[in-house]
Image (cartoon, grey):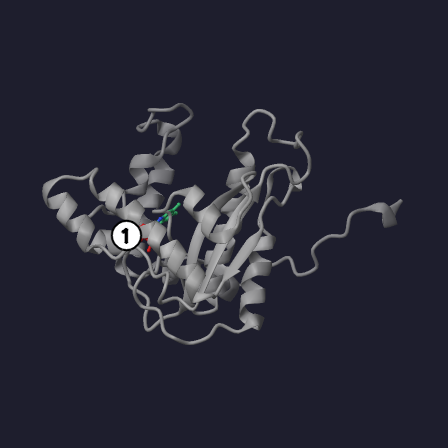
């Protein structure tokens, strides 16, 4: 009987250093648009971050993702042309100072980054019925996004910057990359070594938007119950860790 039990993880414990490493990766990840260096990314490193992406959770374990590795400048140029078109259209949706600020923002590093990656979602990968997707067909799309986040964090731990370019029409992306109609482009990412990582999100530094206070986003048991006593202690703790995060002392405080 015993030998029919599923194998358990052997290295089950996360040391304090392990936890530091994980949180450090999460807090030090940035969306990178402008600091890419012209330094190649080895296949050894690329293979590790792609493997991290491939170990993301997915609905019904369908693993709907594929990864297009783009290094050809002509292909990148075609994508960048699509970005420029989409950015011009998006800029029209803002007015006045907001529009001027939009024009000043750098919102991609397609040509500067040595590697571009497109993460896709094959909605038919395991057939039309998928365990867990029946009530919400978007679950496979979310799964591919989980792969993107794994990749983004693994890249940061490897010292690589990643920037997500969503300002492009999916059909333009399909055409530039030869993606079939049935496959959904999820993320177009620019990836490479960087001169430095910025401390704060660029959109915050540029006064576009700033990080919301986490405690304002917590509801107790029912939507809208933000003052529910069931989560008042939790909110006190959230305020404390948020203050540490602001001061840059979060990592010193996690061993409490
Ligand atoms: C789905 C998604 C799409 C995004 N698209 C773009 C984009 O087209 N251009 C851009 O400059 N940043 C893009 N970003 C990056 C966000 O602006 C960035 O994550 C946010 O400002 C917070 O900054 P941080 O990632 O450095 O913490 C995107 C991020 C996500 C998750």
Figure check: 212 above or below 52? above
| Farthest left residue in view | 96
14 or 140: nearer the viewer: 140
Residue 171, x across and y down, in percent: 44, 42
- All told, the count of numbered labels is 1
113 or 138: nearer the viewer: 113
- In the figure, is residue 182 to the left or right of 245? right
Q: Quadrant of the N terminus?
A: top right
Residue 78, x across and y down, in percent: 40, 56
Residue 11, x across and y down, in percent: 66, 61
> Within the image, what quadrant is residue 143 found in?
top right
Give the residue drawn at x 50%, y 57%. Answer: 151
The residue identified by callout 1 is 243
Residue 179, x across and y down, in percent: 53, 47
Residue 233 in view of the camera: yes
143 or 20: nearer the viewer: 143
Figure check: 8 above or below 231? below
**Element type where label 1 sits in the image:** helix
- In the figure, is residue 119 to the left or right of 105? right
| Farthest right residue in view | 1
- In the figure, is residue 133 to the left or right of 219? right
10 or 107: nearer the viewer: 107
Is the distance from the Cβ of mark 1 to the nearest ligand 1 atom less than 8 Å? no
Tell me if mark 1 has few (under 14), some (14-19) or many (20+) residues whose alpha carbon lies within 10 angstroms of its own: few
Q: Quadrant of the C terminus?
A: bottom left
| Farthest bottom residue in view | 39
Residue 253 in view of the camera: no
């Amino acid at each position: 009987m015993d030998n029919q039990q599923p194998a358990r993880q052997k290295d089950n414990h996360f040391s304090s250093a392990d936890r530091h490493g994980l949180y450090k990766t999460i807090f030090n990840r940035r969306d990178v648009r402008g600091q890419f260096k012209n330094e190649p990314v080895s296949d050894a490193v690329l293979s590790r971050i792609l493997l991290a992406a491939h170990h993301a959770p997915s609905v019904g374990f369908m693993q709907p993702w594929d990864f297009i590795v783009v290094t050809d400048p002509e292909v990148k140029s075609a994508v960048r042309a699509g970005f420029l078109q989409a950015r011009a259209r998006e800029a029209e949706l803002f007015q006045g100072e907001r529009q001027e600020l939009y024009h000043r923002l750098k919102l991609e590093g397609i040509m500067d980054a040595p590697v571009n990656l497109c993460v896709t979602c094959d909605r038919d990968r395991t057939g039309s019925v998928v365990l867990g997707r029946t009530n919400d067909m978007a679950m496979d799309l979310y799964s591919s996004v989980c792969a993107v986040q794994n990749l983004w964090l693994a890249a940061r731990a490897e010292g690589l910057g990643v920037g997500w370019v969503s300002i492009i029409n999916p059909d333009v992306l399909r055409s530039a990359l030869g993606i079939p109609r049935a496959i959904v482009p999820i993320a177009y990412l620019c990836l490479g070594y960087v001169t430095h990582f910025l401390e704060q999100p660029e959109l915050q530094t540029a006064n576009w938007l700033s990080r919301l206070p986490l405690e304002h986003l917590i509801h107790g048991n029912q939507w809208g119950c933000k003052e529910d006593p069931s989560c008042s202690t939790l909110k006190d703790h959230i305020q404390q860790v948020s203050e540490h995060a602001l001061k840059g002392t979060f990592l010193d405080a996690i061993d409490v």
